[in-house]
Image (cartoon, helix red, strand yellow):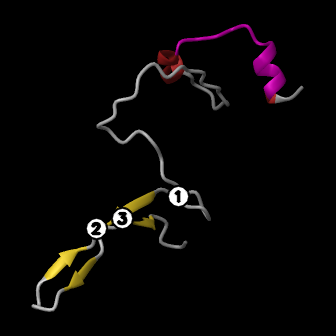
């Protein structure tokens, strides 16, 4: 019996608030419905194509002709995994 079969055939569901009361290690499936998206908060996960670690937004600076520095308008993302 696969994990998927167990889930589909199991009619025992618990509220997500009960996750903290699980004592022994086990796999759980969380089923939810998105009812709203807060547009001014970052809600997605940018992951590296190679290792799936989180990508961090970096600001690339450059030196101007007058000797000052500025930040480029383009977004640069870097993998947070130092070994990637």
Tell whether label 2 touches label 3 (CB within 8 Å).
Answer: no
Q: How crowded is mark 1: few (under 14 residues within 10 Å), some or many (20 or more)?
A: some
Residue 45 place in picture, x, y as percent: 48, 47
Which residue was labeled with disc 1? 53
Alpha carbons under labels 3 and 2: distance apart = 7 Å
Residue 3 place in picture, x, y as percent: 80, 28
Quarter of the image where one finds residue 59? bottom left
Residue at far top of view: 11
Alpha carbons under labels 1 and 2: distance apart = 24 Å
Identify the residue at horizontal 24%, vertical 82% (top origin): 62
Name the N-terminal-most of marks 3 and 1.
Answer: 1
Identify the residue at horizontal 53%, vertical 19% (top origin): 33
Which residue was labeled with disc 2? 73
The stretch of residues the image draws in magenta is 4-15
In the image, taking residue 31 as reference, residue 76 lies left or right, namely left
In the image, taking residue 25 as reference, residue 20 lies left or right, namely left
In the image, residue 67 sits, relative to residue 33, either above or below, namely below
Which residue was labeled with disc 3? 75
Identify the secondary structure beneath mark 1: loop
Alpha carbons under labels 3 and 1: distance apart = 18 Å
């Amino acid at each position: 019996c696969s994990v998927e079969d167990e889930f589909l055939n199991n009619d025992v569901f618990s509220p997500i608030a009960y996750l903290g009361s699980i004592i022994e290690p086990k796999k759980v499936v969380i089923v939810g419905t998105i009812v709203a998206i807060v547009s001014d908060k970052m809600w997605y996960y940018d992951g590296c194509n190679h290792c799936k670690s989180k990508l961090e937004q970096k600001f690339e600076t450059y030196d101007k002709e007058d000797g000052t520095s500025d930040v480029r308008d383009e977004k640069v993302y870097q993998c947070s995994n130092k070994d990637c």
